[in-house]
Image (cartoon, helix red, strand yellow):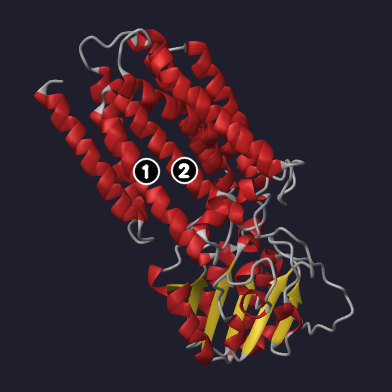
Amino acid sequence: MSTPVLFAYWVTALCFILALKGLSSPKYARHGNMIGAFGAALAVVVTLCLHGLGHRWFIIIAIVFGALLAVPAARLVKMTAIPQMVAIFNGVGGGAAALVSITEFVRLHDTDTNAAASAVVFTAIVGSVSFSGSMITFAKLQELMTGRPILVPGAQYVTSAIALGALGLGIATVPASSVPLLVACGLLSLVLGVLFVLPVGGADVPVVISLLNAFTGLTVAASGYVLDNTLLIVAGTLVGASGTLLTQLMAHAMGRPITGVLFGAFRGGSTAGSTAEVATGDRAVRSAGAEDIAILLAYARKVAIVPGYGLAVAQAQHTIRELVDLLEGRGVQVFYAIHPVAGRMPGHMNVLLAEANVPYEQLKEMDEANPEFTSTDVTVVVGANDVVNPAARDQVGSPIYGMPILNVDEAANVVFMKRSLRPGFAGIDNALLYHPKTTLFFGDAKDSLSKLVAAVKAL
């Protein structure tokens, strides 16, 4: 490559690093995203200008066609469907990298390059697992199939046999330079990805999305080695490393060992959400109307807001921002307590609240928020359930036992906004609903918050 091209690739790699840095903070996430997009666009333009690159017009047509699909999809996607979109985009990336490497192998399989062949095999296996696994996570999140663990009879043995079969075919492919063996390896890996994700249920699904994202990054890095493209190696390694770290952080936030996610399929199912406990209906709950809760909030000194997936479903982020502004106008101190896995993906609540222009200073992560609850007069839980469930802390044997939670029960009062007493995503009942401190406010989150806004204004 010429010096200008290498320099452009260096600038692109720097953009990707700066993008990751920006994405680590809600305050600079938008800027980080734009820097990363600029770096990707620069890489594409420079690559298209390379001498000796064939089929330019086919590539340009493919890019235009992809943009015509992706831009409307990204612009029109609902906030609740962003995790599904991430799963699809991630899976397509892993599948594309695998196909590119396999195509390159078909073109050059007669050459004696064991290292390159090994990289192709790695890409075929990991990329195929990432693709098919991501499609299953999409189906689970989109409720095209049950979100609970699905166990194939003898799952651990079947999955282990298929994994060993794919690995064996891959190893045989390297010295034999056999395209049929490689294709068979890829097909078995597709089945492996499905079996890997099917036994995952409940709150483990977002963790698996992050893990598969790391797989895709490693696939891209390996395909960069096959294509002798340094930029792909750098970009793939960055995605693989950051995805791996994010997976570890999410597993820690869930109180789940990373091996429980990595090898859940081989053990016959994940623990999070593996059983369901429904409300018996024989325990008393306390509920109230908008006027009573408005008085409780308006005359409090300190209020915490705990957002969850229900807030995103109701698209009530702007309404809750209006309520918070009213309370602050009355001298109430308000902050948002954000659990790392609230919603359906990392940062879901941060993105949701950023859409309503909630000041970054009001957002407190779990470790920062938990010490605040003992001095909080009222905690309002909006659409969250599992991340505030005391069973994770107190009930040994619960599917979510050991998961760090927001200790909202330490506040003087808890207002729990829910449609019904149905369990959350993990499928277990929440004892906080029946706590003497808790007041339930039933209804759609947006409708209920609108009533609270009107009631506070009327005071």
Mark identifier at residue 213: 2
Direction left: furthest residue: 3
The percent coordinates of residue 198 (x first, y second) are: 67, 43
The percent coordinates of residue 225 (x first, y second) are: 30, 27
Location of residue 374 with respect to 431 vertically, above or below: below
Query: Which residue appears at 55% of the width and 41% of the height?
Result: 87
The percent coordinates of residue 426 (x first, y second) are: 69, 61
Query: Which residue appears at 27% of the width and 29% of the height?
Result: 43
Residue 135 seen anywhere in this rendered image of the structure: no
The residue closer to the viewer here, 257 or 219, is 257
Q: Check the picture and name the quadrant holding the C terminus.
A: bottom right
Position of residue 314 in the picture relative to residue 123 (left or right): right
Kind of residue at disc 1 = Val
Using a 10 Å C-alpha cutoff, classify the residue at mark 2 as few (fewer than 14 neighbours), some (14 to 19) or many (20 or more): many
Position of residue 107 in the picture relative to residue 308 (left or right): left
Q: Check the picture and name the quadrant holding the N terminus.
A: top left
Location of residue 200 with respect to 218 vertically, above or below: below
Tag 2's secondary structure?
Answer: helix
Q: CA distance from mark 2 to mark 1?
A: 7 Å
Position of residue 301 in the picture relative to residue 400 (left or right): left
Residue 46 falls in image quadrant: top left
The residue closer to the viewer here, 321 or 396, is 396
First reached walking from the N terminus: tag 2 or tag 1: 2
Kind of residue at disc 2 = Asn
Q: Which residue is mark 1?
A: 239
Residue 162 seen anywhere in this rendered image of the structure: yes
